[in-house]
Image (tube, rainbow, N blue to C red):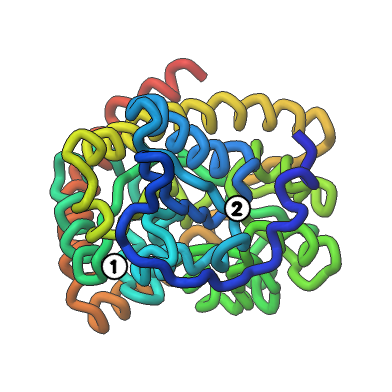
Amino acid sequence: MQRRNFIQGAVAATAGVAITSAPAIASGKIVWKLPTSFPSKAPGVGTNVTSFAKRVEVMSAGRLSFKIYSGGELVPPFAVEDAVQKGTAEIGHSTPYYSAGKNSALHFFATVPFGMTATEHVAWLRHGGGQQLWDEIYAERGLKAFYSGNSGVQSGGWFKKEINSVKDLSGLNMRIAGLGGEAMRKLGVNAVLLPPPEIFPAFKSGAIDAAEWVGPMLDQAFGLNKVANICYTPAFHEPSAALEIVVNQDAFAELPKDLQAIVEEAALATSVETLAQFDYFNTQAMVKLKAGGVLFKEFPEDVISALKQATIEVMDELAQANPQFKQVQQSYQAFLEPTKEYSNLFQGAVYRQRS
C-alpha cells in the first residue's frame, strides 16, 4: 500500500452540515454517515473502521450500512465525536482521547502513561466497570461508545538525535498524543498534537524534531523512517491505545434491537481482528525497518524516571480539577495494581524464559 493512497486528500478538514438523528433511508434500508478520525485506507486504524462497516452490512443482510468518510472529508479528524453528538453523522470512528478536551477522564478509555496493556484494558472495560463509567460519561453528551480495537504497545517516538538524558528533551518540538504530551511538556518539550496526515510533512520539513504515531506498521506506512532512523520503544505514554465506534444515542435507540446487537457485536469482533493485525504486521515491519538501518532503543533510566514523576504530577492535577477523572482513575487503578503483579509473575516470566 502506498502512503500517498491514504494520506492524499485527507489533510483538508471541513465541517459537515448537520442532519437529524433519524436514520437515512434508501430503498427501505438504513444508511448512516460514518466519519473516521483517520485515513480510511491506512492499515490498522483505517481497516478497523472498514472491517467494522463490512461486518455490520453482512450481518444485517444489508439492512444497515455506512458511508465512510476519511479523516477530514466530512469533519475535522479531531471533531468526530462532536459531529456524532450534533447529528452531522449518526455514527463515528475515533479514539477517546481525541475528545479529552471535553472531559479529561476520556484518557482512561484510550490509554494513559505507564498504564494497562491491550488485554488488561479490555479486561477492565468488560469486567472491571470501565464500560459502565464510559457509558455514563458519554450519555451526558447523548453518545454511546463501543470498544472496537487496540494497537497494542506503541512506539515511543522517532528522533533525529539520540536522547541520552533529560536535558536532550528540553526545547524539542514533538508530535505526541494523549497525556504523554502533558508529561513531556513538564520536561521542556513543546508537545503538539497533529492529525495523522500532517505528521510526515511536519517531520520532514523540520517543523517538528520528533514524532510518535503508532508503531512499526503505521510508522513505516507514513514514512517516518525516511526522516529519522532512531525509534524509541516502548511508548511510555501508550502501552496500548483503544479505538472506538461512537453512536448518537437517539439514532441508536431508533434501530431495531437486532441491529443494535449487530453494531455492538461487530465492534467486538473487529477488536479481536485489529489487535491481531497490529501484532502480526508490526512484527513484519520491525524486521524490515531493522534491516533498513533503523535503531530501536529504550529511553535511559533517568528519562523514564522523570517521565514517571511528570505523569504523577499531571494525573494529580487532573484529578483535582475533574471529579470524573478521579472517579475513573480510582476504578482503573483498582485493577491496574493487582494486574501488574499478575502480569509480571506470569507473562513477564514467559517473556524472560523464552528469550
Q: Give the x, y percent position of residue 186.
A: 51, 78
The residue located at (53%, 45%) in the rendering is: 154
In the image, residue 155 sits, relative to residue 209, either above or below, namely above
Choose mark 1 or mark 2, whichever is in front: 2
Q: Residue furthest bottom?
A: 321
Mark identifier at residue 105: 1
Q: How many other residues sit within 10 Å of disc 1, few (<14), some (14-19) or many (≥20)?
A: many
Residue 85 spot, x, y in % from top left:
34, 68
Lower position in the chain sequence, tag 1 or tag 2:
2
Label ID, residue 70: 2
Give the quarter of the figure containing the N terminus: top right
Q: Secondary structure at mark 2?
A: loop
Can residue 114 be seen here? The reply is: no
On the rendered structure, is 172 left or right of 273? right
**Please, what is the three-letter code of the amino acid marked with disc 1?**
Ala
Q: Are marks 1 and 2 in contact (CB under 8 Å)?
A: no
Residue for point 83% across, 69% down: 206
Q: Point out residue 9 in the picture as x, y percentages from the top left corner.
A: 74, 57
Residue 72 drawn above or below residue 3 = below
